[in-house]
Image (cartoon, rainbow, N blue to C red):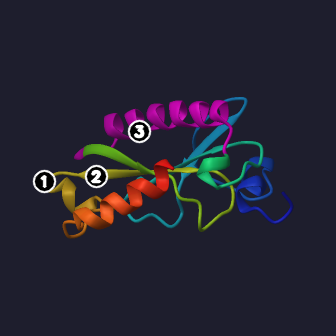
Amino acid sequence: MENCIFCKIVSGEVPAYKVLENDSILAFLDIYPANKGQALVIPKRHVTAQFSKVDSEVMAGTVSVAQEVAQKIEDSLENVSRCIIAIEGFDVPHFHIKIYPTYEPDPVKDAFGRGGPRADDNELKKIQDKITR
């Protein structure tokens, strides 16, 4: 895709700090990290960022590489407790997985997506009914 920053990274038009690459997937460090060592894992061909529309084989391949990158981060960076991931795709409309290292002594401070207050059971039932129709 012509104006996609990730496609430009794949083509070499824009530089990146690559950490893993194979024929179809590229992983590189995020230049706008929330946590030190944050990485992005993308398919090399342009794929929609809309999670529900991503081909399951592309998804599986990207997740597999993300798991490998997470292990490398956990093994090589000091005090990393574990890595967590997010798949959202609002910043760049190219499917990607963000890998966030969490650090000791308080890895929870590096987490995101914490739950909110307890949901109302009636509201949960209404939503369940809409989804399962």
- Residue shown at 76%/62% (left/top)? 4
Instruction: Give the mark nearest the N terminus, 2 or 3.
Output: 3
Q: Which residue is mark 3?
A: 70
Q: Is residue 15 magenta?
A: no
Which amino acid does the dot numbered 3 rest on? Ala
Image location (x, y in percent) of residue 12: 78, 51
Q: CA distance from mark 3 to mark 1?
A: 19 Å
Q: Which residue is mark 1?
A: 105
Where 28 sits versus 61, above or below? below
Q: CA distance from mark 2 to mark 3?
A: 11 Å
Image location (x, y in percent) of residue 44: 73, 42
Crowding around mark 2 (Cα neighbors within 10 Å: few <14, some 14 to 19, many 20+) is many
Q: Please tell me the numbered disc located at residue 48.
A: none
- The answer to whether one can see residue 3 in this image is yes
Which amino acid does the dot numbered 2 rest on? Thr
Which amino acid does the dot numbered 1 rest on? Pro
Q: Secondary structure at mark 2?
A: strand
Q: Which residue is mark 2?
A: 102
Mark 3 vs 1: CB contact within 8 A: no
Crowding around mark 1 (Cα neighbors within 10 Å: few <14, some 14 to 19, many 20+) is few
- The magenta stretch is 54-80
Q: Secondary structure at mark 1?
A: loop
Which of the 4 quarters of the picture holds residue 126?
A: bottom left
Which of the 4 quarters of the picture holds residue 21?
A: top right
